[in-house]
Amino acid sequence: MNILEVEKLTKRYGGESVVEDLSFILEKGTATALIGPNGAGKTTSLSMLANLLSPTSGKITMEKDVSLGFLPQYPQFFPWLTAVEFTELAAKISGVEAKQARLQSIKTLEFVGLENALHKKIGSFSGGMKQRLGLAQAIVHRPNLLLLDEPISALDPTGRREIMNLLKSLQQDTTILYSTHILNDAEEMTDQLLFMREGRLIEQGSLKEVKKKHADPCIQIKFRNHTHALEFVGSHTWKCEVEENLVLIPVSK
Ligand code: ADP
């Protein structure tokens, strides 16, 4: 059963195509990674799915009664609020009853590992804490479809693993679509991989399917200080060690 179907989704600015003919489905209870280098069109795609941006053309069909949780790449926080005040506000905005909102906020903050920071002002939070808080505000109302834009990019490897494990534990009740430029993070929990480059889907399938199809080496692309400059550093197989700032893109046939 599909919770979301995307057909030929396209976004153009002027004549410039940023997302072109994006089509995929999300089956209920699965996790999908949208993978691609900076500028591939991941944020634009997720923003359209979250109804924050109008597509130029194409169709998005969501199952009836979907409750959506969204974590933007750069969430806006109110630094003068405490974590629990902020999450409670997010819960109420998402329709949680006032009586429930406080309790649900506390439980959610505990779940994302912020139990020691419930009453601390967000202004004093580190980048990693903010990323956890962003996740908390996205899930506090218990959505059944979760869209996450680079949910773990600001975390160190231990934090990333922790959050991936949390996402994995949510997966029973929640369908998850998350973007990343780090393939390593995608591998473990993900049922479906969607590779984007220059606005287009260049490959999709389960990890097993993609690996089988691309038994040949992949192209490894290195990011240089997020300047979008790409450098080919040779051919690697899927088994290669991937560093934090590297992404593997399969060779298109
Ligand atoms: P990603 O999330 O994969 O890094 P984005 O979706 O943020 O990619 O951006 C894809 C491309 O679209 C980039 O080249 C970016 O400069 C361009 N883009 C994004 N928003 C706009 C906009 N409002 N106007 C024009 N170009 C845009």
Image: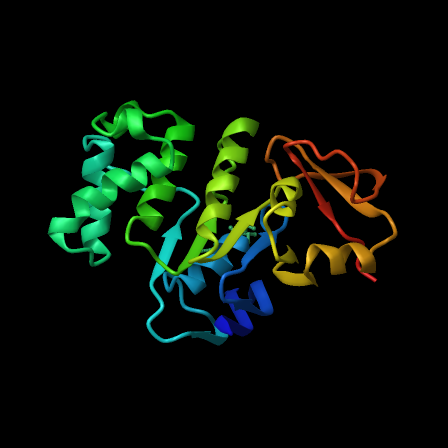
Position of 56 compared to 200: left or right? left
Colour mapping:
rainbow
State whether residue 144 is above or below residue 112: below
**Position of residue 71 measured from the top left corner of the image (x, y, whole percent):** 39, 48
State whether residue 244 is above or below residue 14: above
- Furthest-right residue in this view: 216
Q: Residue shown at 77%/41% (left/top)?
A: 220
Position of 62 compared to 91: left or right? right
Report the quarter where the C terminus lies.
bottom right
Residue 110: quarter of image: top left
- Furthest-left residue in this view: 99
Name the one closer to the observer, 228 or 181: 181
**Position of residue 142 measured from the top left corner of the image (x, y, whole percent):** 32, 54
Q: Residue shown at 20%/59% (left/top)?
A: 95
**Position of residue 41 measured from the top left corner of the image (x, y, whole percent):** 56, 56
Name the one closer to the observer, 201 or 186: 186
Name the one closer to the observer, 120 or 38: 120
Residue 31: quarter of image: bottom right
